Image (spheres, rainbow, N blue to C red):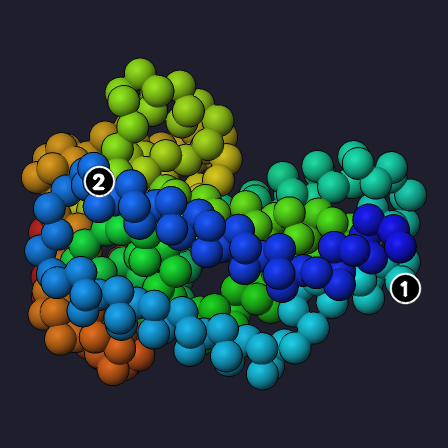
């Protein structure tokens, strides 16, 4: 049995092991040293946020039983994609695939902030009134489905090896939980780490209620993309302890912290004049 075959057969076990392991570590860290005081009951938020995760997992398994790893295996078998066409050595293809998929996630994230219809879906993620490990996994099912289709297309175009896809999926889940954690790093360590990866303090800026801060720090893993494309903001104006988390005018816990409200949020209100990466902030009119 090759290493690729082993990864393929045990993909679910590998992903779940990393997911629950990182989740447990982050949850314990948040309990021991929380960065901010929560304004909504943790029990209510966790039940509903994790309930949305379970719902999304069921939907994805029903719609895409082979998942991303199946697409990668199919593309490899049929010789589809750049890395299969040019016969790049597997180790190099793995590294380049992970970096390329990371960049696509960055672009996708910018896209869901730039297009009003997609922002309707994505605001389910941003509407969380608090910021902790469960925030990193609360997305509307329709956005999850669209994200999976983009991932499939990326894998096919790249011809990403199966191993690269599994590594990327593990990194995606682990980093989403890490940089959404209600935790803080020592300032010197944070400054050093964010030269390479997205830290909790760096990504927390992205969850500010202020428009230009929301439209910054789009990366989820490598921090280079925000610096390269001018979407990086180092710190929130109000500071991490005083900044408001969430979206203006969507402050009712029943609407933004309970599952029925989260599922219907994309279909509530109007989205007009949303300006991505606006540098001057003014409180918007009610939408």
Q: Secondary structure at mark 2?
A: helix
**Cα distance, mark 2 to mark 1?**
50 Å
Label 1 belongs to which residue? 78
Going 29% across and 41% down the picture, which residue do you hit? Answer: 29
Q: Quadrant of the N terminus?
A: bottom right
Q: Position of residue 234 (x, y in %)?
A: 28, 28
Quadrant in the picture for residue 259: bottom left
Going 12% across and 63% down the picture, which residue do you hit? Answer: 41
Label 2 belongs to which residue? 32
Q: Quadrant of the C terminus?
A: bottom left
Q: Position of residue 46 (x, y in %)?
A: 26, 65
Q: Is residue 109 above or below residue 77?
A: above
Q: Position of residue 267 (x, y in %)?
A: 28, 80
Drawn side of residue 53 relative to residue 76, left or right: left
Residue at the farthest top position: 188
Asked whether the viewer can see residue 207, the reply is no
């Amino acid at each position: 049995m090759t290493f690729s075959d082993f990864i393929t057969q045990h993909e679910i076990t590998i992903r779940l092991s990393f997911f629950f392991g990182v989740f447990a570590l982050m949850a314990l860290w948040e309990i021991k040293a929380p960065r901010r005081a929560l304004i909504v009951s943790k029990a209510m938020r966790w039940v509903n946020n994790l309930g949305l995760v379970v719902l999304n997992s069921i939907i994805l398994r029903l719609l895409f039983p082979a998942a991303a790893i199946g697409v990668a295996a199919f593309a490899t078998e049929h010789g589809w994609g750049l890395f299969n066409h040019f016969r790049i050595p597997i180790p190099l293809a793995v590294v380049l695939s992970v970096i390329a998929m990371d960049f696509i996630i960055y672009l996708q994230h910018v896209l869901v902030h730039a297009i009003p219809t997609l922002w309707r879906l994505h605001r389910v993620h941003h509407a969380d009134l608090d910021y902790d490990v469960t925030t990193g996994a609360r997305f509307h099912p329709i956005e999850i489905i669209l994200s999976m289709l983009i991932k499939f297309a990326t894998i096919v175009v790249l011809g990403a090896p199966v191993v690269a896809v599994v590594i990327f999926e593990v990194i995606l889940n682990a980093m989403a939980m890490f940089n959404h954690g209600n935790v803080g790093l020592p300032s010197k360590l944070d400054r050093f780490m964010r030269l390479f990866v997205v830290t909790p303090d760096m990504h927390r800026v992205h969850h500010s209620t202020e428009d230009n801060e929301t439209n910054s720090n789009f990366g989820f893993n490598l921090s280079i993309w925000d610096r390269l494309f001018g979407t990086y903001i180092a710190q929130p104006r109000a500071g991490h302890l005083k900044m408001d988390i969430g979206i203006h005018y969507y402050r009712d816990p029943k609407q933004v912290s309970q599952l029925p409200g989260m599922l219907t949020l994309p279909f509530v209100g109007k989205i007009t004049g949303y300006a991505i990466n606006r540098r001057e902030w003014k409180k918007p009119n009610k939408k």
